[in-house]
Amino acid sequence: MDHFMEIPESILAEPAYAILIGIFFVFFMATLLIIFLLFYQKKLLQARRKADQLEKDRQKELIDAGILAQEQDRKRMANDLHDGFGGTLSAIKLFVGKLEPNMPEEKFARFQDKAIHTLDENITELRGIINDLLPQSLEDEGLIPAIKGMTHQLGSLKDIQVHLHIENERRFAEDKEKAVFRILQELINNATKYSKAKNLNIDFLFGESQLKICYREDGPGFDPGILQNEGRPGSFGFKSIASRMAYLDGHFEANTAPGEGFQVHLSIPLATSSPMK
Amino acid sequence: MSVGEIFRVVTAASNFVAIVPAIIAILTFNRHSRTQRYLAILVWGEALVGLCGSFFNHILQRPNIWLIPFYVILNFVMFTLIFRHYINQRLIPYLIAGFVIFGLTYGIVTNFYAFGEPIRIVEAGGILIYCVLYFRTTLRQLDKENLTQDPIFWISSGAFIYYSASFLFFVTIGFFVEMAEINKLVWGVHALLAILLHVFFFVIAFLKRPRTD
């Protein structure tokens, strides 16, 4: 005997059966929810793993960029020493070697003058290299005087006008000042080497907790797609800037287009800033 | 065998459904985590209640309904301890004490002679909240590589399925009391759900001890 076959149809319409169907419905929905949760958790885990991997790759890229930046600095230093001293020291050696006690006085004085003149050039060159490596003003007076010194020197050597605009100047952590200086040095070096810019504008806005820097140059600009890969054509790119900005825990954004110059906006947190004395 | 007879067998079997996981829990108790041990205590209690209920019902021919408040209290307390990591630690003693007082008061008020819908509804609601807390934490923290190796995932899944359907069952049980045939059918469905819950418990006995528990 099947009890369920005997139930009249009228009873099937009763709330009891609706509730029974409801119980089955809830059961299936709960089961589906568990299955969904299982797959959804796996999907979230995969997404997180992917994000972790991307972050690891980014960190590695920044470390590589840091190492590369160091190598670039060393290479530049080696080139400066070689170009600046290699030739002139040989010339001094040549001049001094030609000096003889019994040579005519006029000739002696000529070689002596040449040696002293070349030595003076060497001393100036050496000061330039030292200043380029670590400006004394950066340690003594801070970022802004060091930038002013660098841009003043640039104006006298190259046909580029640098316009600085500074608001609420103040000093901040020395290591951060050095990193910001290196970033601007990189940008300015790139401008002198690769762009045909005539004017550079650098705005510094010191806020309560952060420093905003707006760098603009009026060069020919370039394809913005290149920024995504290697940075400016022919340049070391933004990797070293990105590496230093990561160290500073800051953000930067670069914009360019053919015919529209080149702009970089930097935003750097200043945790331990102190008012300018 | 008719569907009705099958449901009767299922209902009868559900009284002893905790026995297999209870035996396995005895054999595996020492190598299990604290959560698994709480679950073991739960299935031992369930097996004892099942045996006791059958003894009173079939051998002494006396009602066993007085066991319900104790069974429900056991369930709630053990589930609270199982989900202890997902509940506010300060609340745990209050939840346990509150429910024990509520269950016993209900038993005394009804002279231990009622099915106990109110305590079962609160029990089901509470355990469903625990399950949701576990799922939420799991999705937020994403600290478990393989959920199927986590005993508490199986406990939560089984409890969520069983108590979701049972919550509706406990809320509406009053409808069925007067309809003998439908009542048997509904109890059969409930028995199936209980068996399914214990299948999940059965799986947990074979899982390795989690490193974090």
Image (cartoon, coloured by chain):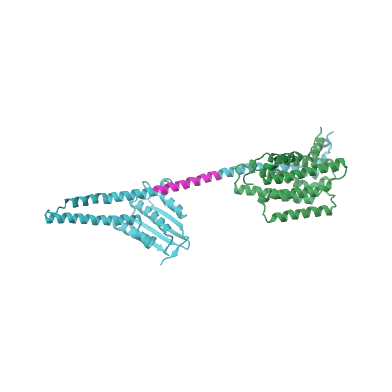
Q: Quadrant of the C terminus of chain A?
A: bottom left
Judging depth in this view, the residue of A125 and B114 nearest the camera is A125
Chain for colour green: B
Residue name at image x 67 percent, y 54 percent: B89
Chain for colour cyan: A
Q: x%, y% of residue B102?
A: 78, 54
Chain part drawn in magenta: A48-68
Q: x%, y% of residue A233?
A: 37, 46
Q: x%, y% of residue A28?
A: 71, 41
Judging depth in this view, the residue of A126 and A193 nearest the camera is A126
Q: How many marks?
A: 0
* Residue at the farthest front position: B30
* Residue at the farthest right position: B61
From the viewer's perspective, tell me whether residue A188 is left or right of residue B138: left
From the viewer's perspective, tell me whether residue B208 is left or right of residue A58: right
Q: Looking at the rendering, which quadrant does residue A188 occupy?
A: bottom left
Q: x%, y% of residue B31?
A: 67, 42
Judging depth in this view, the residue of A238 and B51 nearest the camera is B51
Q: Is residue A58 visible?
A: yes
Q: Quadrant of the N terminus of chain A?
A: top right
Residue name at image x 75 percent, y 55 percent: B98
Looking at the image, residue A111 lies above or below residue B146: below
Residue name at image x 67 percent, y 52 percent: B87
Q: Looking at the rendering, which quadrant does residue A128 occupy?
A: bottom left
Say if the magenta span includes residue A66: yes
Judging depth in this view, the residue of A209 and A120 nearest the camera is A120
Q: Is residue A164 visible?
A: no
Magenta span: predominant SS is helix
* Residue at the farthest bottom position: A277
